[in-house]
Image (cartoon, rainbow, N blue to C red):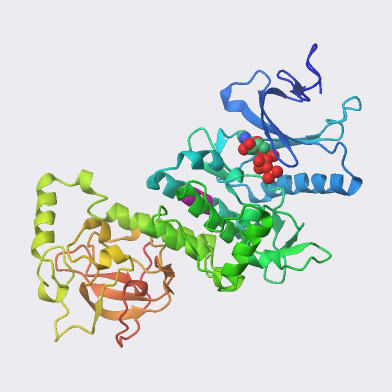
Amino acid sequence: MRRVPGSDDAEPLPPGCRIGDWEVTTPIGAGGWATVYAGRRVGGDAGDDVALKILSTEGLAPRQARKVAESARREVELDRRARHPRLIRILDSVVLSEPDQPFLDGAIVLFMERATRSLRDLMDAGPTEAEGARLITEICEGLAHLHRAGWVHGDLKPDNVLLMADGSAKLADFGLATELTGTRGTHGYAPPMGTFDYLPPERWKAPLGEHGVQVRPSADIWALGIMIHQLFAAGTSPFPGATPAAHAAATQEYAAGRAPLRMDNAVPPFWRALAADCLAPTHALRAAHTAESLLARITARQADKRTSPAGRRYRLPHAALMAAAVCGVAVASWSYAAHDSEAGAPAAATAAEAVGRIRVFNTEQACKDRTDRVPDCSLGLAIDPLHPYTVDNVVPTRVWHGDVLAADCRFPQGVPIVDEAGRWSAQWFRVRLPHGSAQPTAWLPAVRTKDRPALPECPRPTPLR
Ligand SMILES: Nc1ncnc2c1ncn2[C@@H]1O[C@H](COP(=O)(O)OP(=O)(O)OP(=O)(O)O)[C@@H](O)[C@H]1O
């Protein structure tokens, strides 16, 4: 490394200081183990902006220095093996040799994609629900990839979710990441470290073995639950505690069933239900909610919103909107069974041809309480129960709480769906669509009804594509 002549010795890396092909521009901040600087490729342009993370071993006992080196090695290894657009990329790494400068001598430098701020910085301002939804989706995408690739993040928190110049979120700081082992890749072992406010209840009692403490992906899911709550509740945790001991006590009381989960009303209902599942008190209960299944729930909701008349409003001609509004008022107690020939409504369950009737159930209380057909309370029907329940897999026909549908068979092994209350099922009902629809039938997830009529099993549907 070349020091800039006349540089200030008090600052280990002054502006203009060069490391290999990179030049330091300004300091960004410091964490427990690292100091981070902004930098850019020498002679490069804005696209070549990087963050330099300096992990110094100055003044550390050999054992601690080994830990720092190990954590850097882990970050580089994870980047090499599990690279993904939702994870901060590590572009290069070097070990410095600067015998005259103890802070830098033997320090490890990681060159990373540079973010503009962290999720923590955004929390103070408080995002809108739409912005929060997008960020949580992106965090889940990163986490789902990480878990699929066989890693646990181990230190998920708002400081370690970085926001890029375009506003997108990426997971960062993999110094405590653990690779899953075990015969079925279910757990790994990590140093007994982490950030108290984000540790799941079981971690406070986990025995410390030769290889560290056991960690599982469900620990990241717990941390995600805390973050979802914080995002909508101005940074407050559902388990407040001024000290680590107070925080641990609050999570233990909850995990032992002696205290309820207290969520802030500022957290919108869908996100409150999602966070509550992430914060299931034990690993066993939480394991039912993977990053993948949470992501599926979020995308299903987005699909419902996008395909609901409200979501499409800007594309509909005014006359169509008016007609929908008038119908909404006039048919407050409307049931499919009474309107089999009505365009846009699923076919009737007439006594002669219907095999079974199912009543649509919407978990959201606000939607259960109303009898008009407010678009935001409409639910979708899938084209293919074997295809992820996303926007490209929903028919135009909508259904509402209380609608009675004609179902002719059930398919028990579709894509699993979890509703807002955490009810899970892989079963789907094939329901009939109105005459004139693009296709004669569509699929209602079993979590969207409480009925279980005795229906024959459907033949395996032809996949969407
Ligand atoms: N790639 C990056 N781009 C921009 N800023 C970054 C980047 N990585 C880290 N930072 C910022 O640098 C500062 C220090 O980061 P670091 O990861 O060392 O600490 P931390 O996460 O705050 O603390 P700790 O890891 O000790 O809990 C933080 O403000 C962080 O947001």
Q: Is residue 44 left or right of residue 361?
A: right
* Residue in front for this viewpoint, 361 or 21: 361
Residue sitting nearer the eye, 100 or 184: 100
Which residues, given as a range, are shown in magenta? Answer: 136-141
* Residue name at image x 25 percent, y 69 percent: 401
Residue 139 on the magenta segment = yes
Asked if residue 16 is positioned above or below residue 172 in the image, the reply reads above
Left or right for 29, reference 239: right
Side of 197 relative to 141 (left or right): right
* Residue name at image x 21 percent, y 47 percent: 313
Q: Residue at x 36, y 63 (%)?
A: 464
Instruction: Indicate the position of residue 108 as horizontal and vertical percent values.
Output: 79, 37
Examine the rendering and report whether any part of residue 155 can be seen. Answer: yes
* Relative image position of residue 453 (x, y in whole percent): 29, 85
Q: Residue at x 76, y 58 (%)?
A: 192
Main secondary-structure element of the magenta-colored stretch:
helix
